[in-house]
Amino acid sequence: MNMKKFTRLTCLAAAAALSVSASLVSCGDSSTEYYTASQSHSEIIKDAAGKGKVGNWGLGNEYEIQALLAKYNLPTSYLSQAFDMDGFDSDEILLASAMTYNELGLVINDYEGGYGYGNKVSTIDMNDEGVAMLEDNIFCTKEFAKENPNTVKAFVAASLKGWKYACEHPEEAAQMVYEAGSSVSADHQKFMASEVAKLVTTDTKGQKVTNYGNIDREAMQQTLDLAKKYIKLDDSAASARLASMTLDEICDDSFLTGAIGEPEKTSVKIQLKWLPQSQFMGYYVAAAKGYYDEVGLSVEIVSGGGDIGETTAVSNGTVDFGVTWVSNLIAANAGGMELLEVAQIYQRSGLVLVYKLAQ
């Protein structure tokens, strides 16, 4: 991660001397303009989009950005964003995509890898804007679920127990992840854990969630509807499958309840979407606390970030379970995979657009 710190203090200090009643504040000789706290999200989005400075990575949550732009009757194009926040720091991007538990933490905080903006930034939340799409879930193939129902139930139950403990003890969970081979600093792991807990225990409407792993059909339907509108597939057969897809084809909440029988398969693997970090803390906690052992399972947690994506790894049998975003699962099934979500870990979108405030 780039170690660059916040370097625009002089510009922001100059902006602070100007009236906050101005809609935008120019900094120095550049054409860059920061926004005021009094501006509406509509004004900010339209301004940044008009300048072509709304950024996203294009990994499956660009659909939320496109839906947001369409909401304000704007073109749905966006600027390709790198995996750091340097483009935001240098003002190449005015509205930068950030996950609340990851990039936003780096923007705000001044620990290792951080940019140290603190309260000099604000955000636009996809949940508040009504364009949220659900992210991290647990999935397997439909065939595996049919042939190993007890294994699926056992794995889901133990994982959710791990998630419950992690959300109630985020600092301890962060330390477990760090000791398991963290990909980021201990300070960032702690920040991530506290923010991830919010996504697991709060729904898209801001209501408290206590039934961990719940598959909220209303939020899932919104995710599917937006996916159908914005996912573009070259193959005509895949496009047709996407257009006709229903919730029952991509998720099944029957594995969340009922008695757990003896697992048909006792040694399983779960493929994470990315490297070890608190984004996945529930699985590390379940392993460290012996929750998988309690239900008769030996579980290997496989890091992501390699050449094979999580949907492919599950589909081809390299692993038994995977963690992915719902949009990725939808696209994979449209392309011919037969995957099934069996638990929804994140109950709201973690995506925001972050922007700088005139000081």
Image (cartoon, rainbow, N blue to C red):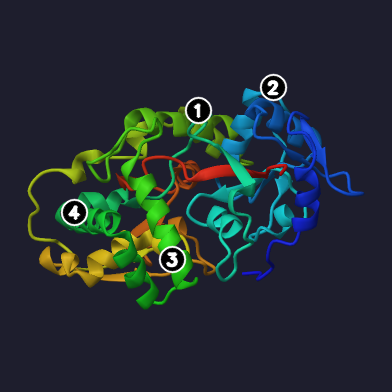
Is there CB contact under 8 Å for labels 4 and 3?
no
Q: Going 51% across and 57% down the picture, which residue do you hit?
A: 102
Left or right, 90 with reference to 321: right
Q: Going 57% across and 29% down the picture, which residue do you hit?
A: 229
Numbered label attached to residue 73: 2
Q: CA distance from mark 1 to mark 2?
A: 15 Å
Q: Which amino acid is tagged 3?
A: Gln
Left or right, 25 with reference to 301: right
Tag 4 secondary structure: helix
Quarter holding the N terminus?
bottom right
Tell me which numbered mark, 3 or 1, is placed earlier along the sequence. Answer: 1
Q: Which amino acid is tagged 4?
A: Ala
Q: Which residue is mark 1?
A: 130
Task: Name above or below for residue 189 compared with residue 55.
Answer: below
Tell me which numbered mark, 3 or 2, is placed earlier along the sequence. Answer: 2
Q: Which residue is mark 3?
A: 189
Visible residue check, residue 246: no
